[in-house]
Image (tube, rainbow, N blue to C red):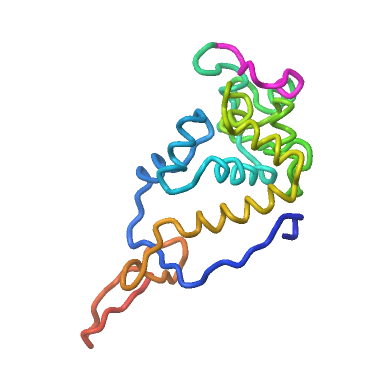
């Protein structure tokens, strides 16, 4: 909200899982190199539709990305040895100046080249000009015949509509696979799974 974006009420009481699976997360979470079909499939698997996909992608109106997340688009797109043809040529030159061909890949650049520190709908205008940073961003607009194109155009024209749909999608995402009852745990440290042990009193104790 401080960056100009919308606000919403977050439901309380959600529990955390008792295990962590990086491999499973890597498979399930959308990646920066994925095609639109793969992105839509991953969202559909968790009950999110195409409008949710486009709206949540709009969060890239804010933040930064490392070169390793998109450098293949600059030099060797899909193994062709050439840049991604959907990437604006001027933007391509700018990015090549930031991410050298044999660079270490940790350099950072803005996800939104227009208003990088403001939560607005310029992300979608960038896509219309082939200025999406990640492949997964530009796929929303540059995939031939995709139903996402009309949504991108709509959100680009009407920021309020983007905000409304973003809030709805965030709430839906927050309700994915909620643990109830005795499932999961309330973590003492959000980044760590609790270590559960039984004490001499016979009660279950949690520590980190």
Residue at the extreme bottom: 201
| Magenta-colored segment: predominant secondary structure | loop
| Residue 97 falls in image quadrant | top right
In the image, residue 85 sits, relative to residue 121, either above or below, namely above
- Considering every residue shown, the one lying at the far top of the view is 81
x, y (%) of residue 49?
50, 44
Position of the C terminus by quadrant: bottom left
Q: Is residue 202 magenta?
A: no
Quadrant in which the N terminus is drawn = bottom right
Q: In percent of the image, x 36 and y 61: which residue is there?
A: 17
Residue at 34%, 75% in the rendered image: 206
Residue 167, position in %: x, y? 62, 56
The part of the chain drawn in magenta is 81-92
Task: Look at the picture and state if 173 lies above or below 101.
Answer: below
- The one nearer the camera, 136 or 109, is 136
Place residue 76 in its image quadrant. top right
Q: Is residue 104 visible?
A: no
Above or below for 100 versus 58: above
User: Which residue is pictured at 32% across the width and 68% down the height?
Assistant: 183
Q: Report which quarter residue 157 is drawn in.
A: top right
- Could you tell me which residue is drawn at 36 percent across and 73 percent down? 207
């Amino acid at each position: 909200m401080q960056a100009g974006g919308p606000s919403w009420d977050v439901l309380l009481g959600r529990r955390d899982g008792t295990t962590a699976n990086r491999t499973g997360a890597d498979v399930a979470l959308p990646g920066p190199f994925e095609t639109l079909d793969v992105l839509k499939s991953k969202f559909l698997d968790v009950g999110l539709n195409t409008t949710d996909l486009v709206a949540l992608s709009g969060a890239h109106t804010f933040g930064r990305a490392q070169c390793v997340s998109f450098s293949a688009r600059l030099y060797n797109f899909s193994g062709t040895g050439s840049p991604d043809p959907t990437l604006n040529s001027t933007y391509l030159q700018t990015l090549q100046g930031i991410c050298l061909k044999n660079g270490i890949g940790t350099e950072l650049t803005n996800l939104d080249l227009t208003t990088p520190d403001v939560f607005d709908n310029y992300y979608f205008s960038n896509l219309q000009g082939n200025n999406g940073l990640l492949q997964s961003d530009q796929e929303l607009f540059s995939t031939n015949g995709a139903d996402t194109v009309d949504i991108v155009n709509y959100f680009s024209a009407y920021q309020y509509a983007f905000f409304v749909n973003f809030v709805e999608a965030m709430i839906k995402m927050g309700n994915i696979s909620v643990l109830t009852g005795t499932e999961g745990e309330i973590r003492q440290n959000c980044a760590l799974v609790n270590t559960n042990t039984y004490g001499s009193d016979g009660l279950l104790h949690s520590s980190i």
